[in-house]
Image (spheres, rainbow, N blue to C red):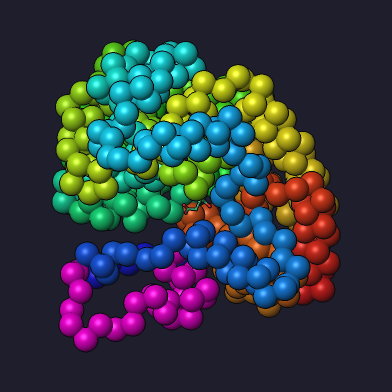
Amino acid sequence: MVCHGPIMSVVAVWCGGARGNLWPVPTRALASRTALLQASPTLAITARAKQMKAEGKDVISFAAGEPDFNTPEAVCTAAKEALDRGFTKYTASAGTPELREAVAAKFWRENGLRYDPRQVIVTCGAKQAVFNSLQVLVEPGDEVLLLAPYWMTYADQIRLAGGQPVVVPCDPANDYQPDFDRLKAAVTPRTKAVIVNSPSNPTGAGFDRGVVKELAALALRHDLWIISDEIYEHLVYDFEPVSPASLGSEVYDRTVTISGCSKSYAMTGWRIGYLAAPLPVATAISALQDQVTSNPTSFAQCGALVALKLPDDTVQSMRAEFAARRELMLEGLASLSGVKTVPPKGAFYCFPDVSPYLGGRFADDAELAKHLLEEALVATIPGSVFEGPGHIRLSYAASREDISRGLERLADCLERAT
Ligand code: PMP
Ligand code: GLU
């Protein structure tokens, strides 16, 4: 019996049943693997908020994990030109040689990582890069360490690879830094890998060089793979992320480094992520991709090639705007009585502790988030989705005006409910 614990109960609250209404009981049995599946709660809540907006409701959404900026014009132009010149056929499954080279150059320029383009795989979003990595590294029964709160997709993808997520909680009072005593205690002979996500979705936590070194030392000591999801690497506030693979050849040899265009260049819909890994891992992933999706969309790759070469100030200006919104949201949250928020070092999420409002009218964060959406027309994601119960996630990838209005509504609603 597979138990999704708190995440499953969130799906139940939102979708009206233990597995939601997503899979009616089939007349003929589905593969047992489907019992491991659930719809992405972040996508489900974002879709619900969009649907309510379409019905004419003035919903303010802090749900979406995507920048609200337009994709830079030069990127769109490159994709249009690619279409016009007929660049609409299959490319190599692992991506065009030009793009793999540009990704390798990016890793050297920005992360101090030397990768041969053959070690680079372009994927359909960073989500597929994580999926592919787990598929080629995890055996049935293997355990993968997750630092909670974590992006829920990791746990689902680990299970789909036949593995078992092993959740190690991080304490907000310690800025969500890894607790190495707990981590060491969680390692067993079946532990195969650890997923590192700095800056983190949903907490915005960032690990400095000393912490990344300690994580790498743990991986070396116990012969673990490191899957380093660096998708938020450019969206940082007085924080400099460190790629584990840059810490020396021994760590490099056991690390898959993942990033992508979605968050840095406001390209979520383009579905272009990438990874770099030791050659045997990259080769296996390339073969996997051959059999699953083939290449990421040809003309989207042409856009990505331009994105990776954009002048720094394009990303800088988006980061500056996120920084201002972060301040605004932190100020608004600070005015809610009893609510504590660890200031995020990166990404575009605040993850306030709303436990003072739970246990009475709202049993838990899922009920509170549902009430906030239905009554205050403010969409947030319950923290339980990320194994961070007692919290809600608010994305500040929203206009300053919406942030101010949304937090006012939230304050009113919480006041009235208590
Ligand atoms: N990793 C993290 C931590 C994320 O929050 C997301 C959100 N989408 C992804 C990976 C996947 O990004 P993409 O849209 O490129 O698949
Ligand atoms: N990663 C984003 C989020 O956390 C996008 C949604 C998803 O892919 O689940 O909201």
Can the viewer see residue 138 in this picture?
Answer: no
| Vertical placement of residue 334 versus 359, above or below | above
Q: Position of residue 358 (x, y in %)?
A: 65, 68
57 inside magenta stretch: no
Q: Which residue appears farthest toward the front when viewing the image?
A: 85
Can the viewer see residue 37 in this picture?
Answer: yes
Q: Position of residue 412 (x, y in %)?
A: 83, 67
Q: Residue at x 66, y 22 (%)?
A: 313
Q: Residue at x 41, y 65 (%)?
A: 39
Q: Is residue 324 left or right of residue 195?
A: right
The quadrant the C terminus occupies is bottom right
Q: Nearer the viewer, residue 300 or 217?
A: 300
| Residues in magenta, as a range | 7-32
| Vertical placement of residue 221 versus 193, above or below | above
Number of numbered callouts drawn: 0
| Vertical placement of residue 6 versus 201, above or below | below
17 inside magenta stretch: yes
Residue 213, quarter of the rendered image: top left
Q: Residue at x 61, y 20 (%)?
A: 312
| Vertical placement of residue 316 versus 151, above or below | above
Q: Secondary structure of the magenta portion, mostly?
A: loop
Q: Is residue 73 left or right of residue 325?
A: left
